[in-house]
Amino acid sequence: MAGIDVAALLAEARYWGLRIATAESCTGGMVAAALTDVAGSSDVFERGFVTYSNAAKVEMLGVSEETLAGHGAVSEAVAREMAEGALAHSAADLAVSITGIAGPGGSEFKPEGRVCFGVARTGRETRVETVEFGALGRAKVRKAATEHALGLLVRAMA
């Protein structure tokens, strides 16, 4: 990734003794791929969950069906449960989650380019946020979301 020094991110996690997990929907594993592109990442990267479907979010991460029904998959509530579920279903200390509408398409209420993120770290409050990347096109939204998630991991180590 161009903007985030992934090797430095991994070195920082290594320094703090943190293991990382990812829970990805619209990015389909791109954050996990960025982390594992760096040789030696296996001592920091614990696992990645690609939970594209709602059923996968429920089965693999323990996301509540009620949360999905009440808020929709693209929501901060689901991003929170995805990040917390990644911690609960792994040996990681730090997890980032991504759920969004990469496009093409979207709706009046959930437009293309809306991506919700969650960051969970053992012993800390889970943080969530929504970024409106806009209708950049599928590839650019996915790339921007991946870069943003890597940045969230860096900030979560501070």
Image (cartoon, rainbow, N blue to C red):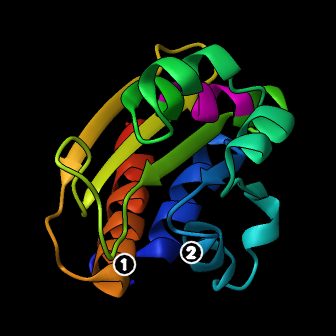
Which quadrant does the N terminus fall into? bottom left
Q: Residue at x 25, y 53 (%)?
A: 107
Cα–Cα gap, marks 2 and 1: 8 Å
x then y, percent, for residue 70: 48, 17
Q: Give the left or right position of residue 112, taking residue 41 as reference.
A: left
Q: Amino acid at mark 2?
A: Met
User: Which mark identifies residue 143?
Assistant: 1
| Up/down of 132 relative to 41, above or below | above
**Is disc 2 placed on a helix, strand or loop?**
helix
Q: What amino acid is labelled 1 in the image?
A: Lys
| Residue placed under numbered mark 2 in the picture | 30
Compared with 113, 103 (above or below) is below
Look at the image and give the residue range highlighted in magenta.
80-85
Does the magenta stretch mainly form a helix, a strand or a loop? helix
Residue 147 spot, x, y in % from top left:
35, 69
Q: Residue at x 62, y 14 (%)?
A: 66
Q: Position of residue 18 (x, y in %)?
A: 67, 42
Q: Regarding mark 1 in the picture, which secondary structure is present there?
A: helix
Q: Is residue 9 magenta?
A: no
Tell me: residue 104, above or below residue 157: below
Q: Quadrant of the C terminus?
A: top left
Q: Is residue 93 visible?
A: yes
At 68% from the left and 43% from the top, the residue drawn is: 54
Residue 71 x, y percent position in the rendering: 43, 24
Image point (78%, 26%), residue name: 62
Q: Decide if residue 79 is on the left or right side of residue 147.
A: right
Residue 86, picture quadrant:
top right
User: Could you tell me if residue 91 is visible in this image?
Assistant: no
